[in-house]
Image (spheres, grey):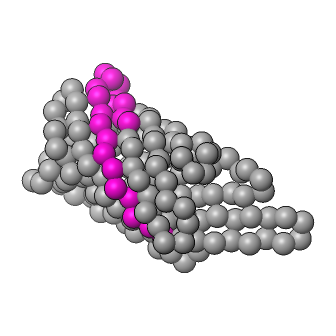
Amino acid sequence: MRTLKFVFILTIGLFIFATSQAEAQRITAGGGVGYGSKSENVNFQVNAYYRLPTLPLRIGGDVGFAKPQDNVTEIESNLNVHFMALDTELISLYTITGLNVLYSRSSGGDITESDTDTGFNLGAGGEIDLGFGRGFGEAKYIVGSNRDEQWILGVGVRVSISN
C-alpha cells in the first residue's frame, strides 16, 4: 500500500511540476479502457502526460480501476516514459517503458486481504488526431516477479490541456 501511495504522490507531483512550467510545454489528459490477457478483466483508466519541450520524450502516468470480480478489487498504476518515434499534428508513434504497481484487495466473509505488486511495462502505442483530441491505442507487456506476466491492450482519448 505504501508503494501505491508513493507512486500516486509522485505522479501528482510530476503533474504539478509540469503544469507550473513556462511556455513550450504540452500537457494532455484523458481516459480509456484496457484489457489484460491473463486477468481477462476490463479496466477503466485516467492518464496525464507532459511532453518535454526539447527532447522526444513524454512523461506521465495512468491509474486504472478494474470492475470487482470474485470479490477481488484491483487498482493499477503506471509511471511511464514515452519515446516519441514520430510526433506530428496528425499522428504519433511511441514506445512505452515504465513502472507498474498493482494493488489488489480480496474479501470473503470477515476476512480481507490486500497485496501490492510491482513490475515493469514495455510496449508501444500510437495516437491519431480526432479534431477535439487524440485517440490512442497501446499494447504493453507487464513483467513482474510476484504475479502473472501479461499483455495489456488499451484504447482511449487524450485532450490537450496546455500548448
Q: Position of residue 68 (x, y in %)?
A: 71, 51
92 or 60, which lies in front? Answer: 92
Q: In the current view of this chain or complex, which residue is farthest to the bottom?
A: 2
Residue at x-position 44% and y-position 58%? 142
The single residue placed furthest to the right in the displayed view is 109
Q: Would residue 124 be found to the left or right of residue 21 on screen? A: right
* Residue 90 placement: quadrant: top left
What is the magenta segment's predominant secondary structure? strand
Taking 107 as reference, is 73 left or right? left
Specify whether residue 36 is painted magenta: no
Above or below: residue 125 compared with residue 110: above
Nearer to me, 146 or 57: 146
Q: Write the start and end of the magenta stretch as one range.
A: 118-137
Could you tell me residue 8's position as x and y percent? Answer: 47, 65
Image location (x, y in percent) of residue 5: 52, 71
**Is residue 80 visible in this depiction of the protein?**
no
Quadrant in the picture for the C terminus: top left
Q: What is the quadrant of residue 112 in the picture?
A: bottom right
- Counting from the top left corner in percent of width and height, residue 114 is at 68, 71
Identity of the residue furthest to the left in this view: 54
On whether residue 134 falls in the magenta region, the answer is: yes
The residue depicted at 16 percent of the width and 44 percent of the height is: 85
Looking at the picture, does residue 97 appear above or below residue 33? below
Q: Is residue 140 above or below residue 143?
A: above
Q: Residue at x 33, y 50 (%)?
A: 123
